[in-house]
Image (spheres, rainbow, N blue to C red):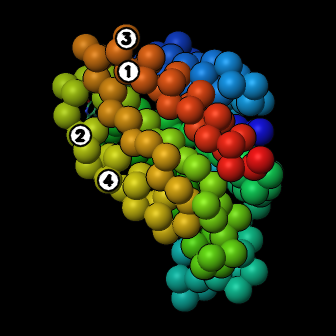
Amino acid sequence: MNVLVLSASPNKDGLTAACAAAAVEGARQASGQAEETRLNDLQVGMCQACDDGWGTCRPEHACQVSDDFQALHARVLEADAVVLVTPVYWGEMSESAKAFTDRLRRCEATRGNESGLADKPVIAVAAAGGSGNGTITCLLSMERWIQHVKGQVFDLIPVKRWTRENKLTTIHEAARAMVEEAKKSAR
Ligand SMILES: Cc1cc2nc3c(=O)[nH]c(=O)nc-3n(C[C@H](O)[C@H](O)[C@H](O)COP(=O)(O)O)c2cc1C
């Protein structure tokens, strides 16, 4: 089982990175293949709302703005499960998480039940390393995104600075359980 762990912070050793590492370790402990992909290391620009609002995303389920999106889109389609970890910025996903998920949603939500994420388990993690505010609004939009692309909301995990250690264990266990569950349903 191939788990794509997407992280969306510019910091390589902050709270978001620790959460992504916990997810990778948890998935691997259940014999899943997993590695972190840092969205901030890629060139994925924001949606251009082409033409009258829809470009090729609606009829062709592919984005016409050419950058690193296309390769990452293909990797999402190949993955069996996804973990999306974002720092909380203003109670929302970070800009890199938003840019990627917006474009992916246009391509996959428009396929309805044929979405490349249909029934794939997704864990969303919102890491609020400042005031600790905004995890719920952030997770709300992440949940809505998962539902739009027809994924399975496997878990939604809020993290604050002061719950870091407990939540790293929670993320590890959630990723492990996600792989175990997927293995059971593949039998
Ligand atoms: C633009 C911006 C907005 C932020 N907004 C919030 C917020 O609403 N709530 C919060 O707890 N922390 C907020 N923070 C702090 C980040 O959530 C914190 O830096 C986060 O842990 C970043 O993860 P990192 O350690 O992986 O960079 C914000 C940080 C930035 C840069």
Q: Which mark is residue 134?
A: 2
Element at badge 1?
helix
Residue in the picture at 58% in, 49% down:
121
Whereabouts is ligand 1, in terms of quadrant? top left
Q: Earlier in the sequence, mark 4 or mark 3?
A: 4
Q: Tell me whether circle 4 and circle 3 mark residues in contact (CB < 8 Å).
A: no
Question: CA–CA distance between discs 4 and 1?
Answer: 18 Å
Image location of residue 115, percent across then percent down:
66, 70
Q: Does the rendering let one see residue 122?
A: yes
Element at badge 3?
helix
Depth check, mark 1 against mark 2: the one in front is 1
Q: Tell me whether circle 1 and circle 3 mark residues in contact (CB < 8 Å).
A: yes
Mark 3, other Cα within 10 Å: few <14 / some 14–19 / many ≥20: few
Q: Earlier in the sequence, mark 4 or mark 2?
A: 2
Question: CA–CA distance between discs 4 and 2?
Answer: 10 Å
Image location of residue 175, percent across then percent down:
57, 31
Callout 2: CB less than 8 Å from ligand 1: yes
Mark 2, other Cα within 10 Å: few <14 / some 14–19 / many ≥20: many
Q: Which mark is residue 140?
A: 4
Q: Quadrant of residue 90?
A: top left
Q: Amino acid at mark 2?
A: Gly
Element at badge 2?
loop
Depth check, mark 4 against mark 2: the one in front is 4
Q: Amino acid at mark 4?
A: Leu
Question: CA–CA distance between discs 1 and 3?
Answer: 5 Å
Q: Which residue is mark 3?
A: 165
Q: Quadrant of residue 143?
A: bottom left
The relative height of residue 35 versus residue 39 in the rendered view (above or below) is above
Image location of residue 127, percent across then percent down:
37, 29
Q: Which residue is mark 1?
A: 167
Mark 1, other Cα within 10 Å: few <14 / some 14–19 / many ≥20: many
Taking depth in this image into account, of 147 and 103 the one nearest to the observer is: 147
